[in-house]
Image (spheres, rainbow, N blue to C red):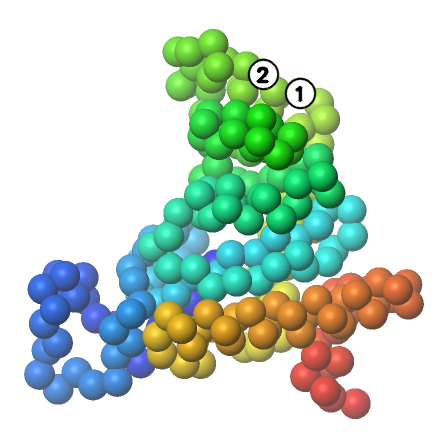
Amino acid sequence: MMIKAKGPVWHQKQKLKGEIPKGLTGIDKEATWSKSRADGWVYGHGSFSIASHKESVLGCFLWMPNSGNEAKRLYVEACHYAGILDYLVMDSKADDQKLFRNLKEQYNIHLVTSCSKEENKTEGRRQMIAAMSSKKCRKIYKERSQTVEPMQGLVKEIFDLDRCWMRGDATNRWLFAAMGLAVQMHQLRAYKEQRSTWKIKAEVLGEP
């Protein structure tokens, strides 16, 4: 999820040169540019989250550079879940044969993603496409849109996170982690009490 930086934007050409236009104050110098189909170009920070499929519970909510590679971050975080889960699911950003192979060989975790069927020139690539086309993987990938995708939106709604509260990588790093921890605590309580793990906004914010 891309989150706009606090303050005005610093245009890419000027940022690369280290030039701050006269009169432009209060910019977040450590924010970066990134683009998505939904939001277009955004100058700010990014968040990375992992959520469970079976029960809608947040696994982690972490800061990452807005321009960072989500698939590489997935690989870094996967080691924490070795032996705990069998499948990790990500959208087409994880369409990477090397990532697919490494997760299986190193952590015995099956990657489920959306594959481009046009890139099928190697045997390894054809095997990956075949695995993604299985009935089980297609079912798991479909579930992702209902139990995983909305999770970042929940965090965003609870904390009114349309724009970063603070400037800089370090401040947003600990702030995002604190947000994730707060949601985890209340979702765990709701799960144990057999309540909805979605309806926790008032509890997190301490409202009656």
Give the number of marks: 2
Q: Position of residue 130 (x, y in %)?
A: 58, 16
The residue at 47%/48% (across/down) is 73
Q: Amino acid at mark 1?
A: Ser
Per the model, the C-alpha gap separating discs 2 and 1 is 7 Å
Mark 1 — residue? 134
Q: Is residue 174 visible?
A: yes
Image: 156 above or below 95 = below
- Locate residue 171: give its quadrant: bottom left
Q: Amino acid at mark 2?
A: Ala
Residue toward you, 77 or 88: 77
Residue at the far bottom in the pictured view: 208
Q: Are marks 2 and 1 in contact (CB under 8 Å)?
A: yes
The residue at 44%/81% (across/down) is 165
Q: Which element is circle 1 on? A: loop
Mark 2 — residue? 130
Image: 99 above or below 67 = above
Q: Is residue 71 left or right of residue 131?
A: left
